[in-house]
Amino acid sequence: MTDQDFEMTPAAGNGLMDRRFFLSAGVAGGIAMLVAAPATANRPAWTQTPGSGMSSYGSPSSFEADVQRVGIGSQAGTVGSGASRTPLEQLEGVITPSGLHFERHHNGIPDIDPDQHKLLIHGLVDRSLSFSLETLARYPMTSRIQFLECSGNSGALLSPTPQERTCAQLHGLVAASEWTGVPLAVLLDEAGVKPGAKWLVAEGADAAMMSRSVPLDKAFDDALIALYQNGERLRPSNGYPMRLFLPGWEGNMSVKWLHRIKVTAAPAMTKDETSKYSDLQPDGTAQLFTFPMGVKSVITNPSGGLNMSKPGLYQITGLAWSGAGSINRVEVSADGGKSWATAALDAPVLTKNLTRFRTAWRWNGAPATLMSRAIDEHGSVQPTRDSLIAGRANGFFYHYNAIQAWQIASTGEVANVYA
Amino acid sequence: MTDQDFEMTPAAGNGLMDRRFFLSAGVAGGIAMLVAAPATANRPAWTQTPGSGMSSYGSPSSFEADVQRVGIGSQAGTVGSGASRTPLEQLEGVITPSGLHFERHHNGIPDIDPDQHKLLIHGLVDRSLSFSLETLARYPMTSRIQFLECSGNSGALLSPTPQERTCAQLHGLVAASEWTGVPLAVLLDEAGVKPGAKWLVAEGADAAMMSRSVPLDKAFDDALIALYQNGERLRPSNGYPMRLFLPGWEGNMSVKWLHRIKVTAAPAMTKDETSKYSDLQPDGTAQLFTFPMGVKSVITNPSGGLNMSKPGLYQITGLAWSGAGSINRVEVSADGGKSWATAALDAPVLTKNLTRFRTAWRWNGAPATLMSRAIDEHGSVQPTRDSLIAGRANGFFYHYNAIQAWQIASTGEVANVYA
């Protein structure tokens, strides 16, 4: 298939190309610089002087010093109660480096001595049990690469007018890691759950003693007591030495610094599930317990604050995910939603994980509006902003999963817009 | 299924349990400590004082300061020419944190300014092309989670007597990452490979100008110009700002700090593929170009230098991989190879990636010899040390992939043995 073939059968309007572009080669056409001959005259300095030595724990290049968590903000009168965001537009693939995983703390990061930390399981059980880290290491573990998203992610898009923000500032409360730990089901079976038990209350050992009620069905389904993240022990900001991990559910429930699980007949109605993380309804009541995060996607590149250098061929890429399972399809539009092209997905597509999508786009230099739309394995389709807002009360803040639109100006500047 | 059922149908000798143990729950039996009631009297200090604030780039807990690369060693008369190893026995899952990815440098780590770095493709091509980082970002990329292993990994096991070493010291020149980059096939097609071209020579921009010859078939198959590792830009020690990545092939060929690819009719016979990385034969000749790494596995826990605290139930876990594809099965023996149990494998099992295996073992406190044996999708079986050595000349150092044996003493001490 030649470049011309692809051009003659565009996948959607305004320059979107077939996803087979990514399965075939040789159609890029003129991005790279032609050179007459190898330039061997000017060997850079680093080829002429021995480099530096090895290290016990490596770091990024000093030229990447601007790759940082963004929007680090504590709430008034506190230190460490607030959030920082993953710089999505500076990253690739789906694994988030642990040092750049977003943070959301309710009373700062505790500095826990792992030798003094225990997990207690009690309440409606046959045997109250206490687990040290050493004890947990002897149980069967498992690893899963899955996303974690704060239920308040993307809430700034409820603002009546679009704010000048980057992808990280808008959507950076999501990240994916390889989580390794002991299935909670194993520990609950060891403790012996009594008849009548329907919930558990998970409590953290931070100074907020953050606690959430979790249905036992979820605990027995795919909940983990996570001990490792991306191969090494959890970072302190992600719950060292252990956290609950509830795949696909709002991040706040994956209680960090977990030290107690009480098996109960009913939810505990803790402050952390009543004063926050509830969804205001039109009649003024609050709906509790919206657990799974909705199907969602965002184009990370190009995105707000970035610049397209000049017309020509570009890769459009972004992330899609669903708390209900795996991503079935991602569609991309370059004409503000009039027409859609199916994007290529990086393998493997895993359940409740971020999925990287990619589309080739030949930008003609005119203003354009880019959008992405995810569909999950259950056929759930990411909603438009209008339809999401139409179904909600004023003040309904959490669980925003609408389609993001990025406006490309003729200058190449990219901005957050409502379209 | 009860604990007793598992006990009555062991999967192999000396306490190895069925891998369904990992799919079922409630059979652990008495690892955890029974507690009479929740101990609420002594709330640890970190629940009573606000924790610390957020950071722009996170780090591990200070309690994990001993989790470091090991065996950092430079060759005589140089700084930074040598190796450091991944601390396999301290990690879990399959993703290696980039800061703990093993290093192997031939003249230290260059500090490359990415704005001054270009990739040149020339030689037997229609058009010589030069690619900047910005240019490459516009091409279609792809991500893959795959292993990288130094061909000299595990060579210490050729020593006539078993050395007192840890798993990392023996086998730590292997790691797995999510690599993201542009398929080399796309760039070669853009340059236009001329008839008669069969190889390419890849050259690094370090002070060793490390260079290796690569068959074009591999370049068009699954070679990447890798730009990202585990989501962020490559670390300097792994080739920042770009490296060649040849899945499954000896690590040295995945040339770091890549700045030049010359398409050729024949291999270049560079110093890095003749003075090293060749396999000595019984007749004194050296066999060149042993590219794929063999099928291999190692138990990372328990392993050399660790201690089992007391008899009882343990998880045996480790890593398996094959340069020829995916792992089909891993077997574990607790009786020095007399009988074998099939281990559980963490999903997803990916081609040319590390695969985490796990087996439950009830240690009776007597001395025992643990082994693991990997079989890949092509039916290749990891060899015993004896059979590997029998087929090799003295001085044949690279590509050691034999079965590792760990001896558990009655004291619980674990040691490297030949068995």
Image (spheres, coloured by chain):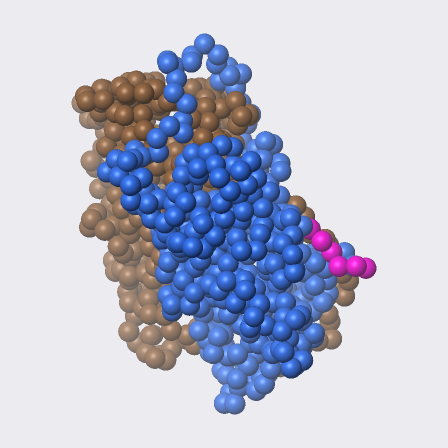
Chain colours: A brown, B blue
Q: Could you tell me which quadrant the N terminus of chain B lies in? A: top left
Seen in the picture, residue B203 relative to A63 is either above or below; the reply is: below
**Whether residue B199 can be seen here:** yes
Q: Which residues are magenta?
A: B72-77
Q: Position of residue B276 (x, y in %)?
A: 67, 71
Residues B291 and B141: in front is B291
> Residue sitting at 28 percent across and 62 percent down?
A341
- Where residue A113 sits, quadrant-wise, is top right
Q: Is residue B66 above or below residue B132?
A: above
Judging depth in this view, the residue of B118 and B149 nearest the camera is B149
Q: Residue at x 76, y 56 (%)?
A: B79
Q: Is residue B129 left or right of residue A194?
A: right
| Nearer to us in this view, A369 or A94 | A94
Q: Residue furthest bottom?
A: B196
Q: Image check: B242 left or right of A185? A: right
- Residue A60 location in percent, x, y? 61, 49
Q: Check if residue B152 falls in the magenta segment.
A: no
Query: Residue A393: where, in percent of width, then height?
Result: 23, 29
Vertical side of B204 occupied by B162: above or below? above
Q: Nearer the viewer, residue B232 or A123?
A: A123
Q: Is residue B132 visible?
A: no
Location of residue B162 by image quarter: bottom right
In the picture, measured across the screen, residue A126 lies left or right of residue B58, that is left
Position of residue A17 relative to residue A318, above or below, is below
